[in-house]
Amino acid sequence: MSDAPTPTDGGPGSAMVRRNPPFSPRRVGAMVLRYIYLIRGSWPRIVEMAYWPTVQMILWGFITLFLIGHSSFIAQAFGILLSGVLLWDVLFRGQLGVAMSFLEEMWSRNLGHLFVSPLRPYEMLVSLMVVSLVRTLIGLIPASLLALMFFGFSLYSLGVPLIGFFLNLIVMGWSMGFMVSGLVLRVGLGAESLVWAAIFAVAPLCGIYYPISVLPDWLQCVAFFLPASHVFEGMRAILVDDVFRSDLMINAILLNVAYLGVGMAVFLAFFRSARINGVILQVGE
Amino acid sequence: MSEPAIEVRDLAKHFGPIVAVDDVDFSVPTGSTTALLGGNGAGKTTTISMLLGLLLPTTGSVTVLGEDMLRHRYRVLPRMNFSSPYVDLPRRLTTAENLRVYAQLYGLPDIGRRLRDVSDAFVLGDIMNRQVASLSAGQKTRVALAKALINAPDLLLLDEPTASLDPDTADWVRGYLKDYQTETDATILLASHNMSEVEHMCDDVIMMHAGRIVDRGAPTELIDRYGRTNLEEVFLDIARRRSQDGDWNKAAQ
């Protein structure tokens, strides 16, 4: 291939495209740019990203104010419910950020164009992670600042472990987002409600607002295999006992390595299945 | 003689009991403009999808620009592009944003310059900053073609390239594609229902029916062979199963 092409050569693509590496940050950047254009072009989308976390935070803030006089558990750790709701939103928004961005491609019937370009499916997954991170931060940061303003609670008082909690939750969200996106690609937009519903299937087991120990024994065993349950236990250890539980953090990280691998593998398997069944050109509203 | 741009051998695609493409063989010479013709359900879009690698064949092989599409499609995708009424560009993005994203996906070195080039070529100046959702059908088709040519492909696959265009614009697009093909020696494979378009643009026509190739030749050859005055009458002959000798396989030979 020529190394010094110009677009006005009029020459065919072999002369214009200089490199085609197996992984290209530039292609990932192109996809991120595509989603940034989408978000930037619609202020209601931006408002919506911050709206729900804020509403949830305010609701649980007032519940906390009410319970603080009625519950010794809440009284000993004022921020336990607010931390729970804000961190839960990281998981929820992380999953939604991946799956909604992917759904945008299905709604706009753009997958055919994307997958005849040099974009690899795994590059798309990386771009979805980046966009999910951006969307999650757009939702979390305003809500966490408003929690400080309204209720005097700082999520950032969790300290450095907050970074670990955040990363573990968002990675679990991405993993679930990949699985759901792959499933919707394979079976069609009739299953798109799974994008919103799937994550709530694990919510009762994550121990967002209560310790895992309240679950029946057999459900505690199931909860052990959820990275989020280790994160929320770790969060309570800091807020209630003022102890950082590195064992819980390590458990969450190890589980997430497996989750991310499985999530990507499931998406790629569904993608291959979609190529066998010919649904990539058929998807759309 | 250069190797063909497309070489298809024993290609078949089954969806359960439905045979969408059945034992298809053909090659498309480099630098030619070839049409896939056939009625609805003939297997044209399925064939194009397999050429692009969007659909995996049940059996057979597809070689594009010298590469096996089942094994090495990413080696040739930067040198190909396509346009189809079955896919859209994101409607909430502007024309310029869409073209910029695709220029970057194709790894073009000077995106600003390339955008100006395709904007000039497809007269997109007034609509570059408008959301695709707000464009007319004809404008969308022009944008889709601009995207299809953003990487100046060696191989261009077009499904109904002039659908939704008024006659004047459609004629302009045909002229543009013809010029592009002449200047770059690119290969164009198009599926179309517009027989006049095929007659004027294409060096070669592959007739499909019920997933099989039932005839092939230059437009004038086909017209002569079937004793008709234009390609549309040939198409109707085939679509209504009234081939010259009533034997599809013989006709295909």
Image (tube, rainbow, N blue to C red):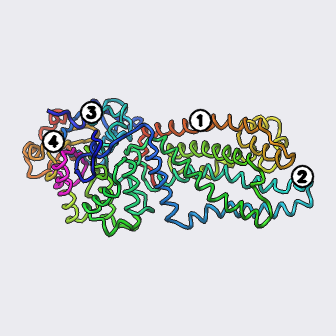
Q: Please check whether the numbered discs 2 and 3 fall on a single chain.
A: no
Residue A148 location (% of width, % of height): 76, 63
Q: Do the residues labelled 2 and 3 touch (CB within 8 Å)?
A: no
Q: In this view, does B196 lie to the left or right of B42?
A: left
Does dot 2 land on a helix, a strand or a loop? helix
On what subunit does the disc labeled 3 rest?
Answer: B
Q: Residues within 10 Å of mark 1 (few under 14, many from 20)?
A: some
Query: Who's the residue at 18% across and 38% down the image?
Result: B29
Q: Please check whether the numbered discs 1 and 3 fall on a single chain.
A: no
Which label lies toward us, 2 or 4? 2
Q: Distance between the residues labelled 1 and 4?
A: 54 Å
Residue A185 location (% of width, % of height): 50, 45
Q: Mark 2 points at which residue?
A: A73
Q: Mark 4 points at which residue?
A: B243
Does dot 3 land on a helix, a strand or a loop? loop
Q: Mark 3 points at which residue?
A: B66
Q: How crowded is mark 2: few (under 14 residues within 10 Å), some or many (20 or more)?
A: few
